[in-house]
Image (cartoon, rainbow, N blue to C red):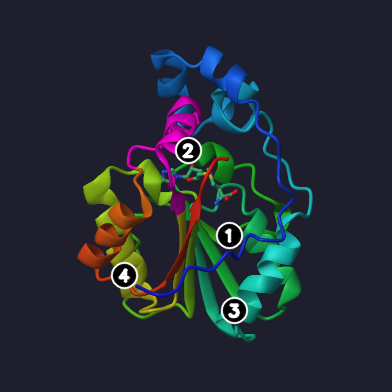
Amino acid sequence: MGARVNLLRSLPTSKRNLQARKDGKSPEVVRISSEFGEMYFDGPREYGYGGYRYDGRWVSVARDIVEHFNLKPGDRVLDVGCAKGFLVKDLLSVCPGLEVFGIDVSTYALSRCEPEVIGRLHLGSADSLPFPDNSFSAVLSINTIHNLDRAGCVTALREMQRLAPGRGYVRVDSYATAEQRALFEDWVLTARFHDYPEGWATVFEEAGYTGDYDWTILE
Ligand SMILES: C[S@@+](CC[C@H](N)C(=O)[O-])C[C@H]1O[C@@H](n2cnc3c(N)ncnc32)[C@H](O)[C@@H]1O
C-alpha cells in the first residue's frame, strides 16, 4: 500500500443536504441512480449529482496530480470512472502533450463528454480494463470503484496495479467513526462496498495494490 494523499485538497467543499437525501431515498431511487444515466448525473439531486457540469474546479486538482506523479508530455494517464471527462480535459490543459484517457460504464456521461476529450474516453468497467500491462504512467480512480462489490473492488485495484504498478491513485468512500458511518449510510446511493480504513487496507493488500489512496468521508 502506498501513501494516503489528498490530491483533491483544492476542491471547494460543498455543503450536502443530508436530511433531504435521507428523506428522498427509496429502493427505486437507488435502482435508478445505480444505472448511472441521465437521472444520476443531471436529474434531481435525490438521484445523484443534480447537474454534473464543467466549472473548472478540476484544473487545480489536475495540477496537483501532474506534480504528484511528476508527469511529462508523452506520458499516458488513465482516469477510471471519468464520467464526462472533466479531469481528462483539465490534465490535457495543464500538461500539454500528456496522453490522457478515460473509461466509464456510463454511456450517458461518455456521450455528453467535453469536446476536448472526444475519442479519448472508453466504455468499460473498472474491473476489466482493456489495456496492456504496464501501459500507463499513472492510473487514477476517484470515487468510482466502491460502486463494485468487495470482490469487484479487489479486481479493479488489481487492474490499476497491472496497468501502472505502484503508480495508482484511488479514492473511495470510508468513515472513521460509527457516527460518520451512520451519516454515510443515510447519504449513499450507489456504493456497493464501503468500509473503515482498516477494511480498505485489507482490500488493497488482497489486490496487491501499492499505489496511493485517500478516503471520501462525510462529516
Ligand atoms: C461519483 S462519480 C465520480 C466521477 C468522477 N470520477 C468525479 O470524481 O467527478 C462515479 C463514476 O463512476 C462510474 N462508474 C460506476 N461504476 C463503474 C465501474 N464499474 N467502472 C467504471 N466506472 C464506473 C459512474 O458512471 C460515474 O461516472
Does the CB distance between marks 1 and 2 fall below 8 Å? no
Q: Dot 2 corresponds to which residue?
A: 180
- Can residue 29 be seen at all in this image of the molecule? yes
The mark closer to the camera, 1 or 3, is 3
Label 4: state its secondary structure. Answer: loop
Mark 2 or 3 closer to N-term? 3
Q: What are the residue bounds of the magenta stretch?
A: 172-193
Task: Identify the amino acid type marked 1.
Answer: Gly
Which residue has dot 3 on it? 68
Picture coordinates of residue 28 (x, y %)? 42, 14
- Residue closer to the observer: 53 or 20: 20
| Residue type of the residue flagged with mark 4 | Tyr
Please name which of the two marks, 2 or 3, marks the residue nearer to the observer. 2
In this rendering, the answer to whether 208 lies above or below 127 is below
Q: Position of residue 7 (x, y in %)?
A: 60, 65
**Mark nearer the N terminus (4 vs 3):** 3
- Tell which tag, 1 or 2, sits nearer the viewer: 2
- Give the residue displayed 57% in from the left and 62% down from the top: 120
Asked whether the residues under the numbered discs 1 and 3 touch, taking CB atoms below 8 Å apart as contact, a structural biologist would say no
Q: Earlier in the sequence, mark 4 or mark 1?
A: 1
Earlier-in-chain disc, 1 versus 3: 3
What amino acid type is highlighted by mark number 3? His
Mark 1 CB within 8 Å of ligand 1:
no
From the image, tell me which residue sits under label 4.
Answer: 209
Residue at screen point 72% across, 78% down: 96
